[in-house]
Amino acid sequence: MRLHTTTVLSLGLVLALAGCSNNTSGPSNPTSSTAAAHAEDHNTPAATPLSSAALAKRLLNETDLGEGYTRKPDTVQQHDDVTVIGCPALAELGGQAATGGSLNFPHSAKVTFTYAASNGSEVSEELYSDTAPKLSTGVNRIFNAMTSCPAYQVSVGSTLIDMRTQQVSAPRLGDEQWSQLLTYSAGGQRSVVKQTAIRSGTILVVVSGSPALVNAHLAAAVRTALAH
C-alpha cells in the first residue's frame, strides 16, 4: 500500500531498533547548548523553497559528527503492509503513517549514520523544503496524530510492534519546533527513538534516532542546513 502522508522515521530504522537492546548512550557534546542558543541568530532561512540537490549539500557529514560515525548506504526500502491498531487518528492518515517513509514534500534529502561507540546506534537527518505554511501544516498534522495516542500497536507484515509516544520539549530553534519520544517493543526487545523537527522559513530539519545522538547533533544539523 503506497501512502502519500507518512512520518519522518523510516520503517527500516524502526525494525532495526526493535531488534536491538535499548541503548541511549552517546558522545558528550558540551557545546551543543551554546550552539542551540545561537544557531538561529547566525543564520538566515531561505526565502524560497530549495531543490533536493541544494538540500543534499546542507546535510551533516562524518566530519561534522566526529569520530566513530559511518554513513549508511542509501537504499530503496520495500515496505510490508502496515496496519495501525488502537489509534484512530493515525489510522485516518494510513497504516504507514505510524512508522514509515518520509514526509510528502516536493524537495528532500536524507542521510543516516551509525555510531560504533554506542552499540551500533543510529542517527538520521532529513531536510525538506516547501512554503512555510505547507511545512507547518504537514508536520503539525503528523505529530499531532502520533502524540494523540500514547499507546497503540502497529502490525508490519507478520511483526506486531507495541508503540508508545510522548511529546517532549524541543530547543527553541527556528520558527517552529516539534519533538517526541517513541518507544518500540517487539520480540521481547525495547528501543526508544527521539524525533525532533525544526522549521526555519522554507526549510524543515528532522533528526531521528538514539535520544543521546539526537540531542548531541540537532543544533549542528540546524546550523548547517541554514548556513548557506
Image (tube, rainbow, N blue to C red):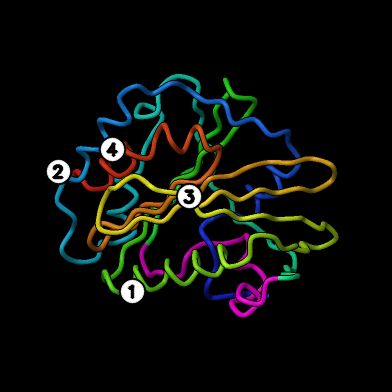
Q: Position of residue 76 (x, y in %)?
A: 59, 56
User: Dot 1: few (<14), some (14–19), or many (≥20) neighbours within 10 Å?
Assistant: few
Question: Which is nearer the N-term, disc 3 or disc 4?
Answer: 4
Residue with the mark numbered 4? 36
Residue with the mark numbered 3? 168
Question: Which is nearer the N-term, disc 1 or disc 4?
Answer: 4
Q: Nearer the viewer, mark 1 or mark 3?
A: 3
Q: Does residue 89 appear left or right of residue 16 in this picture? A: left
Q: Residue at x 62, y 72 (%)?
A: 90
Question: Which is nearer the N-term, disc 4 or disc 2?
Answer: 4
Task: Please tell me whether residue 117 is drawn above or below residue 139 in the rendered image.
Answer: above
User: Dot 2: few (<14), some (14–19), or many (≥20) neighbours within 10 Å?
Assistant: few
Q: Would you say the residues marked 3 and 4 are in contact, meaning their CB atoms lie under 8 Å apart?
A: no
Question: Which is nearer the N-term, disc 2 or disc 3?
Answer: 2
Question: Which is nearer the N-term, disc 1 or disc 3?
Answer: 1
What residue span does the magenta drawing correspond to?
A: 87-107
In the picture, the disc for residue 134 is 1
Q: Amino acid at mark 4?
A: Ala
Q: Nearer the viewer, mark 1 or mark 2?
A: 2
Q: Residue at x 43, y 36 (%)?
A: 215
Magenta stretch containing residue 100, yes or no? yes
